[in-house]
Image: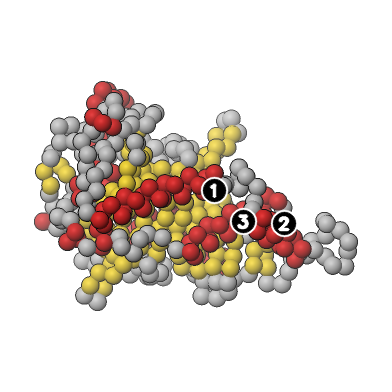
Amino acid sequence: MLSQRFLLLRSAASFTRRSFCTGGALKQGKQGKAPDMIEVRNRLREIVGASTNWSDHQQAMAERVSLSSMLAKSQNELPAKRMKDSYLEVHLPLGSEPQLREKYLTYHNTVRFGRILEDLDSLAVLISYSHTYNSELKRSPLSIVTALVDKIDMRQHVIYPDCDIKFTGHVTWVGKSSIEAKIHMSQYRDGAYASVLDATFVMVARDPGNKRAAFVNPLTPEGPEEERLLQEGEANKSRRVELSTASLLKVAPTQEERTVVHGLFLNTLDTNTVSFRSRILPPNSVWMEDAKLKGLEICHPQERNIFNRIFGGFLMRKAYELGWANACSYGGCRPSLVAVDDILFQKPVEIGSLLMLSSQVCYTQGTYVQVRVHSEVFDPLTRQHNTTNIFHFTFTSDRDVPNIMPKTYGESMLYLDGKRHFDQTVAC
């Protein structure tokens, strides 16, 4: 869970109010207002030198290779930055600009959270570029991409479609080539901004061709609150390493987890037969193999990012919508999102790919549904499948949902993995 003392994002008074950098100067958005998401994406294209025209964009990406000579040979060559240097405030004027609402509106008159995921991803990239900003360079030689969505914690389940939204965020930790950015989202209602969510993104910097890691500016904290945020970033890194080491794909389940799996197995045995193969579904339960939902996306150039790959926010939106649909079908009612956890971007998705998405209800408890979405690229010529992303979503319904029951050992590992993510969410 993000620290309740995350005051730097919750109080604009902690920093000098800023928008993004252009030519070394700070400027506000349209008509003196804080910038909106359209301006964020336009600024990202300026930083990289990308174009909205497909053919020009391809040429611009090829020309970026020449920027490699501008990369730092070590982190010591780069000046240290402060947290305030990357602070951004961006508005989504759903209330004051009604024509914008339709893009974000659901049938049930709420906001499409998949669209919010897209905006969060774009903002995390711009925050990272603000941290690495060099006024002497016309274009950044860095290719900054999303490596991981560490956590998104919902503070309220309903996002209103007719109220303005505000995003604030900044860098809170850096490694040699990685950057942690935290973003707070709030919505204006009843005369004040109320918290909606807190998000933690991990970004990585690579060379202009997106082939190898590149160095980023070190971070110097100012004051006890910033020291605390920096320490939390270090703790987050250690936690991620620990979770990766303890992955069920690498090591056996713990004794407690083995007991859970054996209990599930015994609960599904047919007591009228003496056989390990005879299985019966307990009351109010669903076999895990019957709780899947799949989808396919053809990756068109329209969904490209500034680096000529498929936009990570688009992938998150599609995965979320599939996971939500699966949770809705499983529980028999519209679920609410509780948390997004541990979205890992393993490989970029190329334009023209066939993207196959598979969602699986992998753990349930009371009104909660834990959904895992696996995305992979399928090459119809070689018939090869390559995993690109894993997504974890926690939903809650307004009624108890059926218990999910694994049959195979592989499904039991999915069950335990889902339980781990759920327990981590509840613990926060």
Residue 371 % position (x, y): 54, 58
* Residue of label 1: 374
> Residue 139, located in which quarter of the rendered image?
top left
**In the displayed structure image, the side of residue 246 where residue 196 appears, left or right:** left
Secondary structure under badge 3? helix
Identify which residue is drawn at 34% across, 64% down. 4
From the top left corner, tell me how far across and down residue 181 is, in percent: 32, 49
Q: Are marks 2 and 3 in contact (CB under 8 Å)?
A: no
Quadrant holding the N terminus: bottom left
Is disc 3 in contact with disc 1, using a CB cutoff of under 8 Å?
A: no
> Mark 1 Cα within 10 Å, few/some/many (few <14, many 20+)?
some
Q: Residue at x 54, y 40 (%)?
A: 387
User: What distance separates the C-alpha of mark 1 from that of mark 2?
Assistant: 20 Å
Q: Amino acid at mark 2?
A: Lys
Q: Position of residue 137 (x, y in %)?
A: 18, 32
How many C-alpha atoms fall within 10 Å of the one at disc 2: few (<14), some, or many (≥20)? Answer: some
| Left or right: residue 272 compared with residue 92 | right
- Disc tally is 3
Q: Decide which of 290, 99 is in the foreground and name it.
A: 290
| Residue type of the residue flagged with mark 3 | Leu
Q: Which mark is residue 117?
A: none
Q: Is residue 229 shown to the viewer in this render?
A: yes
Circle 3 sits on which residue?
416
Q: Which mark is residue 407?
A: 2
Direction from residue 347 to residue 2 in the image, left or right: left
| Residue at horizontal 26 percent and vertical 37 percent from the top | 217
Element type at marker 2? Answer: loop
Q: Provide the secondary structure element on which disc 1 rests.
A: strand
Tell me which label, 2 or 3, sits earlier in the chain: 2
- Real-space CA distance between mark 2 and mark 3, rounded to the nearest whole angstrom: 13 Å
